[in-house]
Image: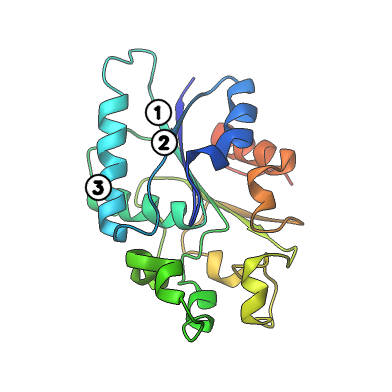
Amino acid sequence: MADIVLVHGLWNRGWSMVALSRRLRACGYTVLVFSYPTRNNSLDGHADALYKFISENRINRPGSDDLHLVGHSLGGLVILNMVARYTDLPRGRVVLMGSPVKGASVVKRLENLPGQKFLFGEIKGGLLKGFEQTPSGRETGVISGTRAFGFGKIAGDPGEPNDGSVTVRETLLDGLSDRVQLQVSHTEMLISSQVAAQVDHFLAHGKFEK
């Protein structure tokens, strides 16, 4: 069975992926969780750290063939940045969960909020960075949430379907193998059994269960 590396989002650490990792391990995967200080580095810096983590943790793993990458929110941006810059990674699929791949408009809407520099730190520019298409040679799927409940609501209603922090439109890339919308909020993705089942289905089949 292929390995999975989970990459968490902003203001979290590896503990936030406990429920998802437990469910994926129950499906038979070997799951590694990359934990990193989200505010204290650039997107390039986090991508470099992820590459180092993968390199160090796949040494002497003879049963490992493919390496799937699953990112929530900012974690998806870290993954996309890494695979664009490193060409010697193992093959595998990518799942992006609520990742603002077109740039996080909520960050722009919060720019005038007192303390926003503390909120976002060095990663602010990375959250505004947009990607044009999916990684070359990697089947990529996107899970978008449509339950508008979360921190992003304090910045106002974006006026389009969203998960409380990221709009559906912001999660979409050219070249996707598949995408699915689920009635979950941005944070609920981390604990949802439905989301975990969809991640498993895409990693196994290259498409979501409709």
Can residue 72 be seen here? yes
Toward which corner of the image does residue 80 lie, by quadrant?
Answer: bottom left
Mark 2 lies on residue: 92
Q: Earlier in the sequence, mark 3 or mark 2?
A: 3
Helix, strand or loop at mark 3: helix
Q: Where residue 55 appears, x then y in whole percent?
A: 26, 31
Toward which corner of the image does residue 77 lie, by quadrant?
Answer: bottom left
Q: Amino acid at mark 1?
A: Asp
Mark 2 to mark 1: distance in Å? 5 Å
Can residue 127 be seen here? no
Q: Residue at x 70, y 72 (%)?
A: 161
Q: Amino acid at mark 2?
A: Gly
Mark 1 to mark 3: distance in Å? 20 Å
Mark 3 lies on residue: 48
Q: Are marks 2 and 1 in contact (CB under 8 Å)?
A: yes
Judge by depth and name the residue closer to the eye, 124 or 5.
124
Mark 1 lies on residue: 66
Above-or-below relation of 99 to 24: below
